[in-house]
Protein backbone atom coordinates (compact mmCIF):
# COMPACT_ATOMS: atom_id res chain seq x y z
CA UNK A 1 0.00 0.00 0.00
CA UNK A 2 1.37 3.39 -0.99
CA UNK A 3 1.31 5.85 1.92
CA UNK A 4 2.21 9.46 2.50
CA UNK A 5 3.06 11.23 5.74
CA UNK A 6 1.51 14.62 6.36
CA UNK A 7 0.57 16.87 9.26
CA UNK A 8 -2.94 17.91 10.23
CA UNK A 9 -3.94 20.56 12.75
CA UNK A 10 -7.02 19.38 14.59
CA UNK A 11 -8.54 20.96 17.67
CA UNK A 12 -5.39 23.01 18.16
CA UNK A 13 -3.00 20.05 18.11
CA UNK A 14 -0.72 18.86 15.33
CA UNK A 15 -0.91 15.25 14.23
CA UNK A 16 1.44 13.39 11.94
CA UNK A 17 -0.54 11.01 9.75
CA UNK A 18 0.86 8.23 7.61
CA UNK A 19 -1.83 6.91 5.36
CA UNK A 20 -3.00 6.35 1.80
CA UNK A 21 -3.26 9.68 -0.05
CA UNK A 22 -6.80 8.84 -1.14
CA UNK A 23 -8.06 8.30 2.42
CA UNK A 24 -11.01 10.54 3.25
CA UNK A 25 -10.63 13.20 5.92
CA UNK A 26 -13.53 11.58 7.78
CA UNK A 27 -11.71 8.26 7.92
CA UNK A 28 -8.40 9.88 8.87
CA UNK A 29 -10.08 11.68 11.77
CA UNK A 30 -11.85 8.58 12.99
CA UNK A 31 -9.33 5.83 12.30
CA UNK A 32 -5.95 7.55 12.48
CA UNK A 33 -6.62 10.26 15.07
CA UNK A 34 -9.26 8.45 17.13
CA UNK A 35 -11.70 11.37 16.85
CA UNK A 36 -14.99 9.54 16.43
CA UNK A 37 -17.28 12.56 16.81
CA UNK A 38 -17.55 13.03 13.03
CA UNK A 39 -19.84 10.22 11.93
CA UNK A 40 -20.05 8.29 8.69
CA UNK A 41 -23.66 8.47 7.56
CA UNK A 42 -24.38 8.69 3.86
CA UNK A 43 -20.71 9.15 2.90
CA UNK A 44 -21.68 11.18 -0.16
CA UNK A 45 -22.31 14.67 1.15
CA UNK A 46 -26.02 14.55 1.93
CA UNK A 47 -26.60 13.93 5.64
CA UNK A 48 -24.12 16.22 7.41
CA UNK A 49 -23.16 13.63 10.03
CA UNK A 50 -19.48 14.03 9.12
CA UNK A 51 -19.47 17.82 9.48
CA UNK A 52 -16.33 19.49 10.86
CA UNK A 53 -15.09 23.07 10.77
CA UNK A 54 -12.22 23.89 8.43
CA UNK A 55 -10.83 27.37 9.01
CA UNK A 56 -14.12 28.25 10.66
CA UNK A 57 -16.42 26.99 7.90
CA UNK A 58 -18.40 23.79 7.93
CA UNK A 59 -17.28 21.14 5.52
CA UNK A 60 -18.30 17.54 4.91
CA UNK A 61 -15.32 15.46 5.83
CA UNK A 62 -16.62 12.60 3.68
CA UNK A 63 -16.14 14.70 0.57
CA UNK A 64 -12.44 15.47 0.80
CA UNK A 65 -9.20 13.65 1.31
CA UNK A 66 -7.33 14.06 4.55
CA UNK A 67 -4.31 15.37 2.70
CA UNK A 68 -6.41 18.25 1.36
CA UNK A 69 -6.70 19.56 4.93
CA UNK A 70 -2.96 20.14 5.29
CA UNK A 71 -2.39 23.72 6.42
CA UNK A 72 -5.98 24.22 7.59
CA UNK A 73 -7.36 24.39 11.12
CA UNK A 74 -9.84 21.59 11.65
CA UNK A 75 -12.26 21.59 14.56
CA UNK A 76 -14.28 18.50 15.42
CA UNK A 77 -16.91 18.19 18.10
CA UNK A 78 -14.16 17.02 20.45
CA UNK A 79 -12.63 20.51 20.22
CA UNK A 80 -15.76 22.54 21.00
CA UNK A 81 -15.68 22.36 24.81
CA UNK A 82 -13.03 24.64 26.26
CA UNK A 83 -11.12 24.09 29.48
CA UNK A 84 -13.43 21.28 30.53
CA UNK A 85 -16.52 23.48 30.14
CA UNK A 86 -19.16 22.56 27.60
CA UNK A 87 -20.05 25.13 24.97
CA UNK A 88 -23.51 26.72 25.47
CA UNK A 89 -24.72 24.83 22.40
CA UNK A 90 -23.69 21.55 23.98
CA UNK A 91 -25.33 22.45 27.26
CA UNK A 92 -28.56 23.55 25.59
CA UNK A 93 -28.71 20.41 23.47
CA UNK A 94 -28.55 18.47 26.70
CA UNK A 95 -31.07 20.65 28.56
CA UNK A 96 -33.56 20.53 25.67
CA UNK A 97 -33.15 16.80 25.05
CA UNK A 98 -32.13 17.72 21.53
CA UNK A 99 -30.58 14.37 20.82
CA UNK A 100 -31.97 10.90 20.74
CA UNK A 101 -29.41 8.49 19.32
CA UNK A 102 -26.93 11.37 18.99
CA UNK A 103 -25.68 10.32 15.57
CA UNK A 104 -26.42 13.69 13.97
CA UNK A 105 -25.54 15.78 17.03
CA UNK A 106 -21.86 16.59 16.36
CA UNK A 107 -22.69 17.83 12.88
CA UNK A 108 -25.71 19.76 14.13
CA UNK A 109 -23.68 21.52 16.80
CA UNK A 110 -20.85 22.45 14.45
CA UNK A 111 -23.31 23.73 11.84
CA UNK A 112 -25.07 25.76 14.54
CA UNK A 113 -21.75 27.09 15.79
CA UNK A 114 -20.89 28.45 12.36
CA UNK A 115 -24.40 29.82 11.89
CA UNK A 116 -24.59 31.63 15.26
CA UNK A 117 -21.20 33.19 14.61
CA UNK A 118 -22.78 35.05 11.71
CA UNK A 119 -26.37 35.28 12.98
CA UNK A 120 -26.28 35.88 16.73
CA UNK A 121 -30.00 36.76 16.96
CA UNK A 122 -31.76 34.34 14.61
CA UNK A 123 -35.43 33.61 14.16
CA UNK A 124 -36.72 30.06 14.31
CA UNK A 125 -37.04 29.83 10.53
CA UNK A 126 -33.44 30.95 10.13
CA UNK A 127 -32.26 28.15 12.39
CA UNK A 128 -34.33 25.57 10.52
CA UNK A 129 -32.89 26.71 7.21
CA UNK A 130 -29.33 26.79 8.57
CA UNK A 131 -29.62 23.22 9.80
CA UNK A 132 -31.51 21.92 6.78
CA UNK A 133 -28.35 20.28 5.46
CA UNK A 134 -27.99 18.19 8.60
CA UNK A 135 -30.38 15.29 8.70
CA UNK A 136 -31.66 13.75 11.92
CA UNK A 137 -32.97 10.28 11.35
CA UNK A 138 -34.56 10.37 14.79
CA UNK A 139 -36.51 13.41 13.53
CA UNK A 140 -36.21 15.46 16.71
CA UNK A 141 -35.94 18.79 14.94
CA UNK A 142 -38.13 20.86 17.28
CA UNK A 143 -35.89 20.24 20.27
CA UNK A 144 -32.78 20.92 18.20
CA UNK A 145 -34.13 24.27 17.05
CA UNK A 146 -35.17 25.17 20.60
CA UNK A 147 -31.67 24.32 21.82
CA UNK A 148 -29.99 26.48 19.19
CA UNK A 149 -32.28 29.43 19.96
CA UNK A 150 -31.58 29.04 23.69
CA UNK A 151 -27.84 28.88 23.06
CA UNK A 152 -28.07 32.02 20.92
CA UNK A 153 -29.75 33.87 23.79
CA UNK A 154 -27.05 32.73 26.21
CA UNK A 155 -24.24 33.62 23.83
CA UNK A 156 -25.68 37.10 23.30
CA UNK A 157 -25.67 37.63 27.06
CA UNK A 158 -22.04 36.52 27.08
S1 LIG B 1 -21.43 11.22 5.88
FE1 LIG B 1 -20.74 13.07 5.00
S2 LIG B 1 -22.56 14.12 4.43
FE2 LIG B 1 -23.25 12.17 5.13
S1 LIG C 1 -30.57 12.19 17.25
FE1 LIG C 1 -30.53 10.35 16.12
S2 LIG C 1 -29.98 11.00 14.13
FE2 LIG C 1 -30.38 12.81 15.17
Image (cartoon, rainbow, N blue to C red):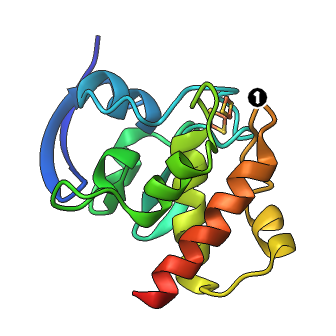
- Give the side of residue 5 with respect to residue 132, left or right: left
- Residue lying at the far top in this picture: please name it: 1
Q: x, y (%) of residue 52? A: 47, 51
- Give the side of residue 106 with respect to residue 101, left or right: left
- Give the side of residue 138 with respect to residue 151, left or right: right
Disc 1 residue lies near ligand 2 with CB under 8 A: yes
Q: Find numbered disc 1 in the image and state the secondary structure of the residue it sits on.
A: loop
Q: In the figure, 66 relative to 89: above or below?
A: above
Location of the N terminus by quadrant is: top left
Residue in front for this viewpoint, 119 or 6? 119
Image quadrant where residue 104 sits:
top right
- Residue lying at the far right in this picture: please name it: 125
The quarter of the image that holds ligand 1 is top right
Q: x, y (%) of residue 41? A: 64, 26
Q: Examine the rendering and report whether any part of residue 63 can be seen.
A: no
Location of mark 1 (residue): 138
Q: x, y (%) of residue 77? A: 39, 47
Q: x, y (%) of residue 5? A: 17, 35
* Numbered disc total: 1
Residue beneath the point at 39% across and 87% down: 158
Amino acid sequence: MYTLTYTLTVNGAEYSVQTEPRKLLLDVLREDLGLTGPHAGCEHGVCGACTVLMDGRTIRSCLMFGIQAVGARIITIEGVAQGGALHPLQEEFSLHHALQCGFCTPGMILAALEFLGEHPDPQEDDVREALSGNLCRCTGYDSIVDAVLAAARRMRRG
